[in-house]
Amino acid sequence: MLKLRRMLPALLMIGVVALGGCVYLRLLQFKKQFRDFHENFEIRSDGHYALIIKKPLLGGDDVDFVMKALPSETEAREGEILSRTYTFHLDDGSQDPRARLEYELRFESDLFVEMHFPEEFSTLFPEDALRELLSSLGDAETDRRSEGMRARLRKNRVRELMPNRARVLEALGEASHRWREKDGLERLLYRYDLETESSHLEPHKRRAFGRFHFEGETLIKVDASFGGHVFSFEIP
C-alpha cells in the first residue's frame, strides 16, 4: 500500500505532462497553419477585424490552458459555450474609452472558429499590416520553457504598412509609460489588467501589456504579453 501511495503522485504527473503535451501539439499545428495564411484563415472587416479560422483545431479547454484565466464573459446555449470574451483595462485608471480592449473568441461545437479584435485595431493597423503580423507567426521561433514566441515579418517594405507613433497614440491613447533609451529608440508601454471570472487569481496573472518600439516615428518592433506568454514581432 505504501508503495502504491508513492507511485500515485508520479502517475498523476505523467498524466499532466501527457495532457499538456497534447495541448502543445495542437498549438504547434495551429501555429503552422499561419504559414499558408490564405489557405487557413480569412480576415473580415465590418467596423472591426475578425479572424476566421477555416480549419479549426483548438477547443475551449485549449484556449483556457493558454489564457490561464477564465474569460471576462461567456455566452452559452444548452450548455455549450458559444463565445469567450476577454476584456483588458489600462491599469492607470484612465476613463478614456480607448483604455478598454475587448477580444471575443467564438466557438462551434467547442472548436475555436473566430476571433474578433478590438475596434481600436481598425485605426491601429491597416488590414494588410494585421495580415502580415499574423502570418509571421507561422515561422516564429518558440520557447516552450518561457512560453514565448519571436516572429520576424517577411516583406521588405512592411514598415510602410505599420502605424507610426502618432497613429498608436491616436488608437490607444496615452501610454502607461514612455521612455527613450541609450540606443535612441523610444518605447511606448501599455499595461493592462484582465477582467476575469477567475476567483483568487494573483494580480500578476491578470496582467498583459503591449510595447511599441520606435526609431523616430517609425515602428520597428511590437511586443505583446498575456497569460505569461510574450509575442515579439520584429519589423524589417
Image (cartoon, rainbow, N blue to C red):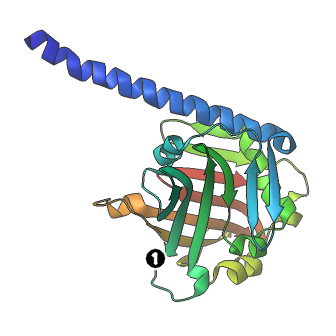
Q: Is residue 47 above or below residue 196?
A: below
Q: Residue 44, position in %: x, y?
A: 81, 61
Q: Residue furthest front?
A: 78
Q: Quadrant of residue 29?
A: top right
Q: Quadrant of residue 7?
A: top left
Q: Quadrant of residue 184?
A: bottom right
Amino acid found under the numbered disc labelled 1: Asp
Q: Which residue is mark 1?
A: 91
**Count of numbered marks:** 1
Q: Is residue 19 above or below residue 139?
A: above
Q: Is residue 99 above or below residue 57?
A: below
Q: Does residue 181 appear in this view?
A: no
Left or right of 230, for residue 12: left
Residue at left 52%, top 33%? Answer: 23
Left or right of 35, for residue 185: left
Residue at left 87%, top 60%? Answer: 128
Tell me the element at label 1: loop
Q: Residue 4, position in %: x, y?
A: 15, 12
Q: Residue furthest left?
A: 2
Residue at left 74%, top 55%? Answer: 51
Q: Residue 152, position in %: x, y?
A: 75, 47
Residue at left 67%, top 37%? Answer: 30
32 or 54: nearer the viewer: 54
Q: Does residue 208 appear in this view?
A: yes
Tell me the crowding category of disc 1: few under 14, some 14 to 19, or many 20 or more residues within 10 angstroms, Cα based: some
